[in-house]
Amino acid sequence: MTEHTPHNRDKNYRIRKESSFLKALSVSNDAGEIKPSMYNKYRQICRFIEIFMERVERTQAIKQKRVKVLDIGSGKSYLTFAIYDQLTEAGLNPKVDGVDTRPEMVNLCNDAAEVCGFENLAFHNLKAEDFFEGYYDAIVALHACDTATDDALFYGIKSKSKLIVCAPCCQNEVLKDLQKSGTQSRKFISHGLFLQKQADIITDNSRVMLLRSQGYQVDVIDFVSTEHTQKNTLITATRKNKPSREYENEYENYKKSFGFNGIKLERLMRVEGLLRSK
């Protein structure tokens, strides 16, 4: 029987194992081999970049001389570096920015970008709401906690970005409303864990409706195996159409049915005049 190791499970991943950023971020060793402890991370990076680049092609941004991308809540920025690497490979002369509130992460990533020679990749120690550098073709937010995901989605919607990609995390806003809700649907859920799961689904479904109200075509997919992380839902939104009142009305009925007051994304959109006033 053949022993299954990371080496004999290899396939033609989009990102080369010897890529400089993998070494700079300690995913690979000096010989350009993926470290055994980082193989799952490498596979996740490759899976994400397949989805991201396919969506970029859908938007026709691939035909531009330059593609601008903003990663909100970039963290250690494995995927931010991968985006820059792959856009460069495609000959697009990218401009990529990462925003994070942890100075140690920002410093680490800026140092790694310099080592890799990624001149147009920069990281900024700011909150999402404090960063606004104009238009970006794509907005990315992976595992931005709770309402930080809404900040990222709003940035993309307000800027009319061609592509928005987010992996929500730690949704708590709607849960507080559901705990007090007297709707019929709430009466059948008594276990706290089930209520949390319902709040997560309601939150993400609300985001999908609000994105659709602004003319985005939305896909919801599992982008990594649940054996690696339970937070594996990826929402991708591609700007296709004009804003639609249909999804706005659907969202209002949705709130009434489940007995919650709304989400931060809705409030931000109302202040900006993107939704009708109540």
Image (cartoon, rainbow, N blue to C red):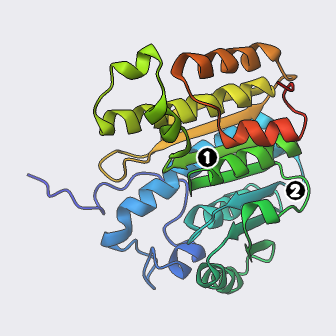
Q: Nearer the viewer, residue 166 or 126?
A: 126
Residue 55 screen position, x and y as percent: 68, 39
Disc on res. 66: 2
Residue type (three-letter) at the residue carrying disc 1? Cys
Q: Which residue is mark 1?
A: 166
Tell me which corner region of the image, top left, top right, bottom left or bottom right, holds residue 206: top right
Q: Secondary structure at mark 1?
A: strand
Above or below residue 50? Residue 115 is below
Q: Nearer the viewer, residue 225 or 28?
A: 225
Above or below residue 20? Residue 91 is above
Tell me which corner region of the image, top left, top right, bottom left or bottom right, holds residue 113: bottom right
Residue at 61% across, 77% down: 102
**Left or right: 21 with respect to 132?**
left
Residue 231 screen position, x and y as percent: 43, 48
Tell me which corner region of the image, top left, top right, bottom left or bottom right, holds residue 87: bottom right
Q: Nearer the viewer, residue 23 or 41?
A: 41
Res. 29 in view: yes
Q: Nearer the viewer, mark 2 or mark 1?
A: 1
Comes first in the chain, label 2 or label 1: 2
Q: Specify few, some or many for label 1: CA neighbours under 10 Å numbering under 14, 14-19, or 20 or more.
A: many
Q: Secondary structure at mark 2?
A: loop
Residue 32 screen position, x and y as percent: 46, 77
